[in-house]
Image: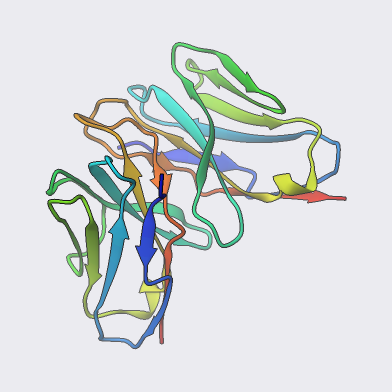
Amino acid sequence: KAGVTQTPRYLIKTRGQQVTLSCSPISGHRSVSWYQQTPGQGLQFLFEYFSETQRNKGNFPGRFSGRQFSNSRSEMNVSTLELGDSALYLCASSPGTSGNTGELFFGEGSRLTVL
Amino acid sequence: GENVEQHPSTLSVQEGDSAVIKCTYSDSASNYFPWYKQELGKGPQLIIDIRSNVGEKKDQRIAVTLNKTAKHFSLHITETQPEDSAVYFCAAISIGGNTPLVFGKGTRLSVIA
């Protein structure tokens, strides 16, 4: 069974640009969560989608957005990039149905560098 | 909301020694406590978990303990090996609820051969 796939793995952008990251969950998983990982801050929750609906949102500015498609694939977008957005963005899928199960399967992440 | 504190942030041990990582949580509604291991260049991977109706759980060289009263839970690794070197994250969540999994800030474990 294929794991969670994230693309691109690495990307470099400049301040003010926007970026779109993609995530394909494990087959059959309908829940997709996104986390931002930075040194010293650990894993900070961005948002979670289940059956194309945003189920939860973390404390990030409106520049961070996401969506989920009918095949459970998800994208997240960051507009007007700032230097502080440089981070590893991790996507995780879960077999959860109603409510959270707590067991997340992570991809290898997309490392974003903002210059 | 839930807040998870994790200590220490870095830990170095000699091969064969034990390592202990401690976490505290704030939300008494949390009832599931997983531990994730992140190796270099990879995403975190679940290695063990414990539910609030259990005080201790073991899986070979790793064990987790939970003290619900004190809202503490710990990861114990015995007979450490170089391949145990990684970043470990604790987390907490209320299963079936509407809140996401909240992680601690991680512990970088180095096992020195």
**Residue positioned 88% across, 50% down in the render:** B113
Occupied quadrant, residue B22 = top right
Q: Residue at x 79, y 33 (%)?
A: B18
- Could you tell me residue B76's position as x and y percent? 68, 29
Q: Tell me residue A52's x, y (percent).
A: 12, 49
Q: Is residue A113 above or below residue B40?
A: below
Residue A95 appears left or right of A54: right
Q: Specify whether residue B108 is in view.
A: no
| Viewer-nearest residue: B59 or A4 | A4
Q: Nearer the viewer, residue B22 or B46?
A: B46
The quarter holding residue B51 reads: top left
Quarter-wise, where is residue A97 in the image?
Answer: top left
- Residue at x-position 46% and y-position 59%: A108
Instruction: Spot the residue most to the front.
Output: A1
**Quadrant (top left, top right, bottom left, bottom right) of the N terminus of chain A:** top left
| Observer-nearest of B85 and B10 | B85
What colouring method underlies this structural image? Answer: rainbow
Quadrant, the C terminus of chain A: bottom left
- Counting from the top left corner in percent of width and height, residue B3 is at 40, 39
Q: Position of residue B85 (x, y in %)?
A: 71, 50
Residue displayed at 25% across by 42% down? A31
